Amino acid sequence: MKTVKVNVVTPDGPVYDAEVEMVSVKAQSGELGILPGHIPMVAPLKTGAVRLKKGSSTELVAVSGGFIEVRPDNVTILAQAAEAAEDIDLERAQASRERAESRLNDKAEQIDAHRAELALRRAINRIDVRNNRM
Ligand code: ATP
């Protein structure tokens, strides 16, 4: 089975590094499935799950935006924040979701709704990846 090397990198350091058979990401333009030998490209990502297929298992990494750079034998995902499913603190993500939801619901408070919306998306993505609901 052919493989492609995938690195997920953040400003805090590498988060994931493995040879996989397929990587799927949520690009701004839609879901992208990348197999070994893919033509080179760069695409911006949405906050979402990266799925990494290795044999019969699929690993998940939660990625908060960023870019994917594809080359025929390696894929680099650069993101402001990214966590492998097993490294996600579910309680922290749930608290973050509640905070963002109450900010969005609180009409009286002067809030940055866009910022709260982005925080909510990051939190929901982490909860879904942690719970393997992708
Ligand atoms: P919070 O409100 O919990 O800080 P956030 O969405 O504002 O969440 P980020 O700014 O995206 O957090 O991330 C800051 C750092 O904390 C990053 O290194 C990120 O990987 C890490 N991080 C954020 N939430 C979690 C989580 N639930 N579990 C593990 N690491 C997390």
Image: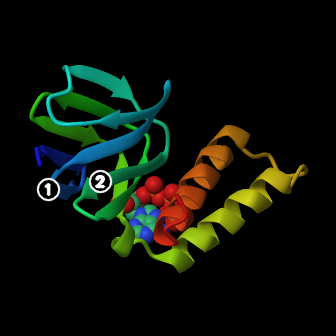
**What kind of element bears circle 2?**
strand
Residue in view at x 55 percent, y 67 percent: 127
Please state the horizontal and vertical placement of residue 49, each as a whole percent of the image: 44, 51
Is residue 32 visible from the viewing direction of this image? Answer: yes
Residue in view at x 23 percent, y 36 percent: 35
Q: CB under 8 Å between callouts 2 and 1?
A: yes
Please state the horizontal and vertical placement of residue 7, each as a whole percent of the image: 18, 48
Amino acid on which the number 2 mark rests in the picture: Leu
Q: Which of 118 and 33 is in front in this view?
A: 33
Residue found at the far front of this picture: 1
Left/right of residue 24 with respect to residue 110 in the rendered view: left
Q: Give the CA separation, mark 2 to mark 1.
A: 9 Å
- Mark 2 or mark 1: name the one nearer the start of the chain: 1
Please state the horizontal and vertical placement of residue 38, each as a whole percent of the image: 20, 26
Residue found at the far right of this picture: 108
Q: Please tell me in which quadrant of the rendered image residue 113 appears.
A: top right
Q: Nearer the viewer, residue 88 or 37?
A: 37
Amino acid on which the number 1 mark rests in the picture: Ala
Q: Residue under label 2, please give it.
A: 52
Q: Residue under label 1, please give it.
A: 18
Q: In this view, does 77 lie above or below 29?
A: below
Q: In this view, does 107 lie above or below 97?
A: above
Report ligand 1 position as a quadrant. Answer: bottom left
